[in-house]
Amino acid sequence: MEEGIPLNDEDRIPWLCTLHDILRREDTSRQDTILACSALKKMYRRVLIGGASAIESNQPEQPGENPPLKILFVHLDGPKDIIAARLEKRRGHFMPLELLQSQFDTLEPPSAPENFITVSLEKPLPEILLQIETAILQGEALPE
């Protein structure tokens, strides 16, 4: 990405599997965890929930394996110009502004039955944080 080349599925899947393993470890230790990443595609979110088995099966779990993780995905939604302005203000970040369009091209916004909330980036930061915190504390959208 630093070189202006967008990542593809082959680049992302091993990284997402590693993130799943970290989330699984924290869940096993009964630790609440917040992870920030751009899980742009539905498949990427399935891998975070179910690990590598979600790739082959197109499902978040396989019989006899660990149950799927309970994850609340926060979809930060906003117009490209707002996101571009924020990217331009970043210092020392690996993603160049030129890759923003590739992110929008790849994006598959979450939809039912995925477990998610959508938060507008057009709100002030304190409101964004409050909406996310409220959803987490109220267990919004978390499956039983």
Image (cartoon, rainbow, N blue to C red):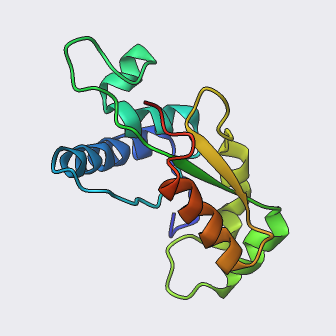
Please report the residue visible at 39 percent of the width from the left and 40 percent of the height from the top: 48
67 or 144, which is in the foreground? 144
Query: Eyeballing the image, is 6 above or below 140?
Result: below
Relative to 115, say whether 104 is above or below.
below
Taking 130 as reference, is 141 above or below it?
A: above
Q: Is residue 65 left or right of residue 112?
A: left
Count of marks, rendered view: 0
**Horizontal and vertical percent position of residue 78:** 78, 61
* Residue at left offset 54%, top offset 64%: 133
At which x and y percent is residue 32? Answer: 31, 56
Residue 56 percent across, percent down from the top left: 37, 18
**Image spot of residue 79 (x, y percent):** 83, 62
The C terminus, quarter of image: top left
User: Which quadrant of the figure has residue 59?
Assistant: top left
Residue furthest left in the image: 29
The one of 3 and 43 positioned closer to us in this rendering: 43
Q: Residue at x 31, y 41 (%)?
A: 17
Residue farthest toward the top in the current orientation of the protein: 63
Q: Residue at x 39, y 14 (%)?
A: 57
